[in-house]
């Protein structure tokens, strides 16, 4: 299965499992913040995927520079968006951070497994 399909499957699975508790116990502000957090993490991982795909067959130095440097830039943008969403738009902090964190960890796991698989296939 391709990486974007894995991301979509993970997104839909977590949404399916988490939708009942979210709607049963959360208010509109919590639900909105959770959805935005999921979207932020999903966009973040897809940018990471693009960086991996564009530089995987380049030299190791270029690959690491783009992937790790891009990760730093993406984290900075994510932090800036958090400040904007929380301070300016008044998003629920706990729901936004938890949602983003859950998806970030899940997607990071998928990303590491994806890179490992690509490296293994290249070495064969």
Image (cartoon, grey):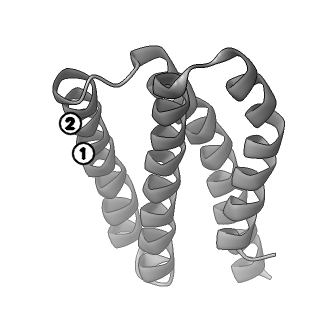
Image spot of residue 37 (x, y percent): 48, 38
For mark 2, does the 10 Å Cα neighbourhood hold few (<14), some (14 to 19), or many (20 or more) residues? few
Instruction: Classify residue 122 by image quadrant.
Output: bottom right
Residue 87 place in picture, x, y as percent: 19, 22
Dot 2 falls on a residue whose secondary structure is helix
- At numbered mark 1, what does the secondary structure look like: helix, strand or loop? helix
Circles 2 and 1 in contact, beta carbons < 8 Å: yes
Q: Position of residue 17 (x, y in %)?
A: 83, 37
Classify 10 Å Cα crowding around label 1: few (below 14), some (14-19), many (20 and above).
Answer: few
Reply above or below: 25 against 77. above
Q: Nearer the viewer, residue 36 or 64?
A: 36
Q: Is residue 65 above or below residue 10?
A: below
- Mark 2 and mark 1: span between their CA atoms? 5 Å
Q: Which image quadrant is residue 82 in? A: top left
Q: Quadrant of the N terminus?
A: bottom right
In-front residue for pair 117/89: 89
Q: Which mark is residue 77?
A: 1
Relative to 58, residue 103 above or below:
above
Residue occupying image coordinates x 36% and y 50%: 71
Indicate left or right for 12 with 93 as reference: right
Q: Give the residue pinned by disc 2.
A: 80
Q: Residue at x 32, y 65 (%)?
A: 66
The residue at the point 50 percent across, 64 percent down is 46
Q: In the drawing, does residue 65 fall left or right of residue 43?
A: left
């Amino acid at each position: 299965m391709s990486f974007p399909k894995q991301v979509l499957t993970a997104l839909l699975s977590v949404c399916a499992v988490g939708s009942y508790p979210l709607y049963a116990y959360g208010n509109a502000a919590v639900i909105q913040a959770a959805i935005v957090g999921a979207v932020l993490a999903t966009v973040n991982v897809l940018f990471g995927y693009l960086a991996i795909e564009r530089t995987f067959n380049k030299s190791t130095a270029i690959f690491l520079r783009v992937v790790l440097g891009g990760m730093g830039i993406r984290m900075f943008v994510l932090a800036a968006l958090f400040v904007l969403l929380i301070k300016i738009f008044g998003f629920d902090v706990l729901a936004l951070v938890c949602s983003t964190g859950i998806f970030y960890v899940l997607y990071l796991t998928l990303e590491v497994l994806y890179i490992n698989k690509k490296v293994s296939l290249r070495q064969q």
